[in-house]
Every structure is written in C-alpha cells, then in structure tokens.
Image: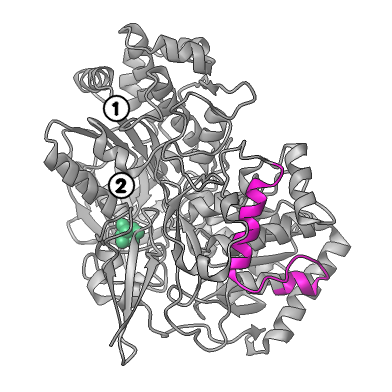
Amino acid sequence: MSIETKTTCPYCGVGCGVIAKVDDTGKVSVAGDPDHPANFGRLCSKGSALAETIDLDGRLLFPEIAGERAEWDEALDLVAKRFGETVTEHGPDSVAFYVSGQLLTEDYYVANKLMKGFIGSGNIDTNSRLCMSSSVAGHRRAFGSDTVPGTYEDLELADLVILTGSNLAWCHPVLYQRLAAAKSARPFMKIVVIDPRRTMTCDIADMHLAIRPDGDVALFMGLLAHLAESNALDRAYIATHTTGFENAVTAAASLSFDDVMERSGLAAEQLRAFFRLFETVEKSVTCYSQGVNQSASGTDKVNAIINCHLATGRIGRPGMGPFSLTGQPNAMGGREVGGLANMLAAHMAIEDRQDRDRVQRFWGSPVIAERPGLKAVDMFRAVAEGRIKALWIMATNPVVSMPDADAVAAAIKSCPFVVVSDVLRETDTTRHADILLPSLGWGEKDGTVTNSERRISRQRRFLPAPGEAKADWWQMAEVGRRMGFQGFDFRSPADIFGEHAALSAFENEGSRDFDIGAFSRIDGDTYQDLAPFQWPVSREGTTRTRFFADGDFYHPDGKARFMTIQAPETSRTNGRFGLTLNTGRIRDQWHTMTRTGKSARLSGHMAEPFAEIHPRDAMERGIRSAALVEVESPHGSVVVRALITERQARGSIFVPMHWNDQFAAKARIDALVPAVTDPVSGQPASKNIAITARPFDAA
Ligand code: SF4
C-alpha cells in the first residue's frame, strides 16, 4: 500500500500540483495532480523526475561550527550572540540576511519579521532580486502596488499571446503545454515570440522577432506611438482610469521609426506586421520573464509593455493583460511577506510611515526598519567593504549565482561571521560559512508557496526529516527568541500562516489588494487540507480572479500611471569585447543543478555546458563545432563546448547559467556577469554582456 500526499513542485513559478506516493519500501514516485488548477495533472521533465533527486547523498545532516559537528543549541546560541553583539556594536545595518525564492512563505515571513521588526534593519534581500524584481518595480510604478493582473487561463483565452524575453517551452514548460493545447484548439490564435534566439518556444509561434538584446523598450515605445497614430487607443479608458498618457506618448513618438528599427534590430516589415497585429487583436496578453527583467533597463521594459495595455484598456479582462512570469517556485510568496529589501509584509510599503506603523503595532515590535535595506548586489558590496559584519545566507548559492561571482566569493570569505542554512554540505557558498545549519528539503518541509498567477498552494511533508535537519522558519524563530525578542514562539507553519493572514487584514478592511485575512484563525487541520486558491480572499471566502477589471488601481487617486520612458542604448560591446552574452536556463536543469544534477535522465538532455554561437561568428573566430571555446568578459572567463547554430542571432552568444565549477572546470557563467543593475529595481543585468570568444587553448 502506498501513501499519497498532495504537494507542489519546487522548481519553476508555474507552481504545478504534484501527488507524491511513498510505498511500503519507502520508494517515492510522483505524478501530476489532476485537480491542481495550475497544471491539471501535467508535469514537465523536471517535475516528473522529482523522485530521482531526493536521496540523501551530499546532505548536510547536522549543525556545524567551524567545520565541526555541533549541537543545535550551541549553534543557535552562537548565531544569536554574534548577531546581537554585532547589532549592539555597529548598529542594525551591520547585519544582513540573504534568502531565496526556494524558501516557503512561512520561512520568508519569519526572516522578514526578525530583520525588519526586531533587528530594525531593511537588510533582507533574496535571490528573487535576480529573477523578477524589475516586474515588481514596474507594477508598483504603474499600478501603485505589486499586483499581477492576470491568470494562466488568460493565455488560453487570448487571440494574441506575445512572449517577450520568455523561453516558455523550457522555463515554464507546463504553461507552454497549456498554451500549445489552446492554440491547437483555437488555430486562429496568434503567438509572437520576441527573443534574440530562435528558442524551442518558436515551434508554436506565428512570428519570431529576433530582437537585439535590450531592444524591447524601443519596440514597445514604437508600438505605443503606432497605436496613437492609428487611432487604436481606448481614449475613454485612458481618460477615466489613467494619468500620464500625453507625456508617455510624446516620448514614444520622439523615437522615429528608423530609431525603433535600429535599436530593436528588426526590419521595417517585421515591425509593421507586429504593430498591426497588436492594433487589430483586442484579446491580447503580453507575457514577460527574465529576458525583460534581467536588464539595466528592466523596469522601463516592464512599463513600456504595460503602457501599451493601458493605452488600449486591455487589462484585467479575460484574455487580456500584461503578465509577468516568475522564475522561482515562491518568488511571489516572498513578495507577499516583504522578502525584498524595499518592501514590508503583506504588500505594504517600507517608505510609507502609516504602513510601517501598522506593521510595528501588529508585531508589537520594539523597532521597525525605517528605510529600504540593501538590495542583493549592494548587499554583497557592503560585505566586501566591511559594512556588513554578520551575514546569514539561506537556501541559495550566491557564490555561483550572483553577478561578479568571484568578487562575491571574496566578499563572503572576508565577512567576520557567516551563517549558511542549506540542505547540502558542500556548495561553493557553504565552504565559506562559520556556522552551517541543516535545513529541510522538498518533501520534508511544510508550508505554502505562491505561483505566478497569485495562487497559494501547500507544499506538504511526506518524508521524515533527515539527520537533525530543521525547518528554516524554526531556525530563525529560535534565533529571534535567543536574541530576547517576543513574538517568535511559533509552533508550526500553520501558526505563521495564520499570523501572516491576520497581518494582511489588520486595520485594513480589505482595502488593499493583498488580503488573505479569511485565514487568520486557521487551525492545523484546515491548514493541512488547504486547497490551492488565488488571493485576495474576502471574509466571505470569495476570490478575485483578475485585478483592474473595474479600472481601480492602487495609487491614491485610484488611477494607473503611464510611465514616460527613454529608450536606452542597446549595444554594450566595446573594443575586443565585441560579442554579446545572454545567459539563461535549459529545459532539464534547475538553478545550480544541486538537485536536478542528481538525475541521470535530466542530465542526459544536455550533458555539459555550451555556448550557442552563429556560424558566421564562429567562422570568423576559428571556432569549430563541438570544440572547446573560451568565453571571456572583463570579469572572468569560462570554457564550454561550442554549439554552432543558426538559432542564435549574429553578434550574440548564449550560455546556460546552471553549471558551476563542481560540475565542469571553469563553467561558472556568473563570474562573467558585471554587477550592473537596473537603477529602479536593483536587478542585475544578466543579459547583454560584452564578451569575446575564441578557441580554447589548453596549453
Ligand atoms: Fe515543476 Fe515548473 Fe515543470 Fe510545473 S512546469 S512541473 S512547476 S518545473
């Protein structure tokens, strides 16, 4: 007999429901949950291989201090003591937490409460900063809150789906399957892919626009100007529900058609065909992901897209709207509880005195962070400069994943006190830790996650905790208590979820978008049985599928904002660094491969790191097919296999982000990425990096 548990996939932001079965022998198998509204039983290759990735090989099973096994009490006391002493001596901004979209919402909540409400600093940021923070910033500028307007169903209902900076087929595979099925059922549906590469997503596209990296702002400014010229605007919607249109459209019109061609790298007939399609097809959704977000102009890209939807009133209605797709399983949950340095819990704003006051009174906390903390790149800079003296890293591997990764490694090494909570004993980051704390992995931990369409689902435990591993929320609550703070006596994730829900409704009367107050008195049984739902949830239990259908936004005047945008220069190449590097995911690996790398089946898809390069670029540089190639930026170099293909646009190279030096010598691609960030969101530009490439000379 086997025991079945309904849970959620721990990989991408689609947030698929999974049924995990454990048989009499302890063997685990997985299947898609037919009742989960994200996937209706589907799973992609990564989700299907989950059972192959949960062995205990390489696990961190016991706390360690300075490399020696320690008792939990001893380790937690030391963390509390060192953080407390550092705060006393150097102030609250001398400490920081760097957490992860892999954390569950309950973990995130406790981390945020401890740092912002009790230590009194905003210095908690997350690797989600690297993933979707430009979308957060764009939403807040346009809507007055970080609110995703649409749902997955909108992709199936639309007559035009634009995928920009999104290789949906590989990065959100089940959503791609849903879109492909919808297109089969409704052949008149049009799909446009905007991407410098001809990715697998183009298999279902009617139009592929091989845009120049960072040409998106110009493209959508050109579209806005075209809509105005063609009298294809929804003037009534603009007048009633928005402000700032005239300035935005004047700025857009200042870019000539030739400028748009030049900056986007697209031909006149391609631009005209795309503009005409958007102009004429009302039911249109524009999805965007890392190709938009991971840019020095990421926030402007997001707002350039939103501008076009506001101008046509295509938002909040079935089959219409801008739609940010999150990369990680709980990037959205982190946003809900203030997991970003510039946000407070329950979608409240750290810059807003009333919000700060409300959160502080709810927590009964002695202090509250009064200003945004350091965002990821600035946080590690502060570590390098000695301004951060105690750092707690949780469920992430910044030595591999941060831009300018070698400098990040050196910074962590130089930090006087580093705590790492992880499931693995040996990562590029754990080796720099003074204290290692063993965390629970997927299948062992309990909590909630939120997917890209605001759907909260349970991750449930179906495996015993290995060794002495403990939940991340428990570790932080214990440290909070040992630092002498009240309000950290949580007994279970249900307790934390209930408090989080109560905060979302505290003195709030449901007037804000994020409200799950209906669950503020949730008990353990109800939490255990919680079915997936979309926020907000009224006291009566009804949810809202789409936002902004009524034209009500969250700025004080209730109106959305058009943003006036200037098109950035797109070329970053210079001198001998005459090529452009774009980084990204492949279908069967996840992040730094700490889990997916365990599956032979998944590793069989692409066994080693590679650089996709156009045949002409390869020929000019003497690079032969399948030979080793050295890709170098001013920050570092990697050696990978050349994959010569016409899928790649001339002048740019694609290298996947997953491999690190543990899997292949000199393959850490983020060592090449400069620490350049979007000025609004602080998100690093992991695309459009000036590089050079040449045959690798082993001698
Ligand atoms: Fe998991 Fe994403 Fe695949 Fe769904 S699409 S099974 S959430 S990796």
Occupied quadrant, residue 254: top left
Ligand 1 neighbours mark 1 (CB distance < 8 Å): no
Image location (x, y in percent) of residue 672: 45, 53
Residue 646 visible in this rendered orientation of the protein: no
Do the residues bearing badges 1 and 2 touch, measured as CB atoms within 8 Å? no
Cα distance, mark 1 to mark 2? 16 Å
**Front residue (pair 517, 582):** 517
Image location (x, y in percent) of residue 199: 23, 46
Q: Which mark is residue 265?
A: 1
Magenta span of residues = 478-507
Instruction: Give the residue drawn at x 42%, y 44%.
Output: 689
How was this image coloured? one colour
Occupied quadrant, residue 266: top left
Q: Which mark is residue 653?
A: 2
**N-term mark: 1 or 2:** 1
The rendered magenta stretch, by its main secondary structure, is classed as helix
Instruction: Give the residue drawn at x 70%, y 48%.
Output: 373
Residue type beneath disc 2: Ile
Image location (x, y in percent) of residue 87: 83, 62
In the picture, the quarter occupied by the C terminus is bottom left
